[in-house]
Structure formats: C-alpha cells, structure tokens
Image (cartoon, rainbow, N blue to C red):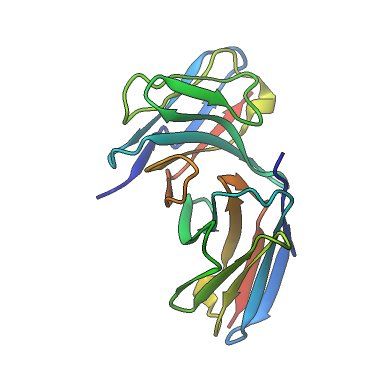
Amino acid sequence: EAQVTQNPRYLITVTGKKLTVTCSQNMNHEYMSWYRQDPGLGLRQIYYSMNVEVTDKGDVPEGYKVSRKEKRNFPLILESPSPNQTSLYFCASSLVGFAGTEAFFGQGTRLTVV
Amino acid sequence: KQEVTQIPAALSVPEGENLVLNCSFTDSAIYNLQWFRQDPGKGLTSLLLIQSSQREQTSGRLNASLDKSSGRSTLYIAASQPGDSATYLCALNMRFGAGTRLTVKP
C-alpha cells in the first residue's frame, strides 16, 4: 500500500530534550516536506526536499533541522525543543516537487513540549 | 510570497444542499492547485489536483475550478452528505490556506 508513515504519532517531551520525528514513504517520491499545523494558522511549511541531499527552508524553519540521506526517509529533528513548538506535525511527499503531482500526507505527529 | 485565503472559515448546511467553498491566492504563477480533505485528528487526503494549464477537475460529486486571472479557485460539492463533514484545504504549490470547516447536518 502506498503510504507516508510518521512516527511517533504522539509525543510528550520536556524543554531542551532533543527529539526526532521520522517520516518514510514507499512510493519512490522525489519531493518530501514537513508542515506544522496550529489552530487558526493552517499548515505552515517547515522544510522541504526536492531530492536526496537537497533540502530547503520553508516558512517556519527556526528551531528545526532535517536531513535527506536516502530517498525514502526525511526525519525532522528538534535539537532543543521549546513549548512554542507544541503542534501537530505532518510529513508529505509527492512524485516531483511542485509540478502538478498529487501529494500524500502522513497521519500526523502530535507533539507537546512542557 | 504566495498568500492563500479560504472563506468562510466554517460552514454549516443541511444535507442535500449544493455548496461552494472558496480559495483565493495572490500570485498567479502557480504550478498546481490541490484541494484536500482533513478529518479530525487525521492526515490530509488529496481530493482534486488541477494543473496550471487546466481550468477544472471533477471527481464524483466534487468539481474544482481554477481561474488564475482572478486568483480564485472554487470547490463545488453536489448533494452534500453528513459524511462530507470535514475541513477542506486548498494548496497552491503546496502552500496552504487555513481551511474551511464544513458541517453537513442530517
């Protein structure tokens, strides 16, 4: 089954404790991206990757890191999480960047930083 | 920078009604527009994808149109059903609006 898989689905952590949210897709997609969703603000893009070893900042990259060492995986790293990073996070992938291909989303990771 | 606006933020209609959801954008230099559905606590599901060279797409009871000159897209839902209740989001080049929360009452 074609899918984007995020883990974990739920995470509660403390301020400053490094964490990684994993994202994996099985569709051989070139493009992957991370979003956060907050009430009233919609989805905002954190980082995106057009292909392996190519990553770019989205609209809200501060406090986040990503890597794209292999095509199927695109982990999101929070080196020192803060309470304002409490949010619902989504990973997405599509065959080719912005150019008119359907996007697939993971089920989301609800992160709470206390 | 592309700005995407969806109005209204919430909409409640009786079952069976035809309805239109609106999406406006500021930059006509787009590659594609997608409409998504999001159920509470779930991820997003792509409903319709309109490429830059297209004017509309249809899938079942759903029809989406794209007018780049006016910076608008609409999602038309025919004969709405309670199962259509969800948040609908439009995205231009993967930049999202805040969504319209639709409730269809039996």
Q: Residue at x 37, y 24 (%)?
A: A52
Which quadrant would the N terminus of chain B be assigned to in this image?
A: top right
Figure quadrant of residue A85? top right
Quarter in which the C terminus of chain B is drawn = bottom right
Figure label count: 0
Does the image show residue A54? yes
Q: Position of residue A79 (x, y in %)?
A: 55, 13
- Residue B74 picture location, percent across and down: 64, 68
Asked whether B23 or B42 is in front, the reply is B23
Out of A50 and B29, give the one closest to the viewer.
Answer: B29
Q: Can residue B39 be seen here?
A: no
Residue A27 in percent (x, y) is at: 29, 42
Whether residue A41 sits left or right of residue A19 in the image: it is: right
- Relative to B17, is B37 on the left or the right? left
Q: Quadrant of residue B10?
A: bottom right
Image position of A88 (left or right of B72)? left
Q: Is B104 situated above or below A90?
A: below
Q: Is residue B32 above or below residue A59?
A: below
Q: Is residue A76 above or below residue B56?
A: above
Question: B87 or B94, which lies in front?
Answer: B94
Picture quadrant of residue A112: top right
User: Image point 52% across, 50% down: which residue?
Assistant: B41
Nearest the viewer among B69 and B25 is: B69
Q: Residue at 60%, 18% (x, y): give it.
A: A81
The residue depicted at 67 percent of the width and 52 percent of the height is B28
Residue furthest to the left: A1
Seen in the picture, residue B43 relative to A32 is either above or below; the reply is below
